[in-house]
Amino acid sequence: MLTIDGVTKAYANAEGPVAVLNGVSLALAAGESLALTGESGSGKSTLLHLAGALDRPDGGTVSVGGVDLAGLDDAGLAMVRRDRIGIIFQQFNLIPSLSVAANIGFQARLAGRFDAGWTAHMAGVLGLTALLGRYPDELSGGQQQRVAIGRALGSRPGLILADEPTGNLDEATGEAVLGLMLDLVAESGAALLMVTHSDRLAGRLARRLHLRAGRVA
């Protein structure tokens, strides 16, 4: 579902280019889960952005569901993000003017794959059924993150990317939310790549990849 082969990425600053990723490779099949760990600045979020078709590598290849992203223009990348990828951000990124129900269904409707039964099932699993008519500013942080999980999984994408999905939550809430996310991802059959600083949370996924200074340690 996700293949990253020899990827390199650098960013420019006042002193010149700074290498962030130096030949990173990984493969993730449908139904697999992988935790991406490493210190701040090791390249974790950059790698996640490349996997999510949010940025382009300087070298190497990224393929999602057998599609080589290098051959796509910006519109093509947008279609891959819409149809094949669900992203869960640390900051929730819900649409304030939409209800919980509309936020959950947002990406699925864009992709033309809205399934009322699946959406209702997710809302039940995530404990959101009684909150579907509310708006994001009426929810706790844990509730907002559960809405974000439902939105990412709504279209049943083949790949789920999670960037520190419990980073803004207290430990107990974060553990509960992660458990719900893992249950739904497993049920959907998607591949999961999750960035985390926590060894404890990483241990709940099937595999772990550690980055150090832009390389697999």
Image (cartoon, rainbow, N blue to C red):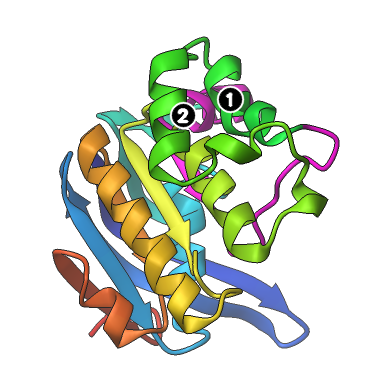
- Residue type at tag 1: Gly
Q: Inspect the magenta stretch and tell me whether residue 91 lies in it.
A: yes
If the image is split into quadrants, where does the N terminus sit?
A: top left
Give the quadrant of residue 109.
top right
Give 31 or 114, whichever is nearer the viewer. 114
Which residue is found at the position 43% from the left and 62% from the top?
177
Judging by the rendered image, the residue that carries numbered circle 2 is 154
- x, y percentage for residue 18? 58, 80
Which residue is found at the position 21% from the left and 66% from the top?
205
Judging by the rendered image, the residue that carries numbered circle 1 is 105
- x, y percentage for residue 114? 49, 14
Q: Is residue 200 above or below residue 59?
A: below
Closer to the N terminus: mark 2 or mark 1? Answer: 1
Tag 2 secondary structure: loop
State left or right for residue 160 relative to residue 173. left
Which residue is found at the position 64% from the left and 54% from the top?
144
Which residue is found at the position 42% from the left and 37% from the top?
124
Distance from the alpha carbon under mark 2 to that under mark 1 = 6 Å
- x, y percentage for residue 123? 48, 35
Tag 1 secondary structure: helix
* Residues shaded magenta: 74-98
Q: Is residue 130 above or below residue 51?
A: above
Give 86 or 81, whichever is nearer the viewer. 86
Q: Are marks 2 and 1 in contact (CB under 8 Å)?
A: yes
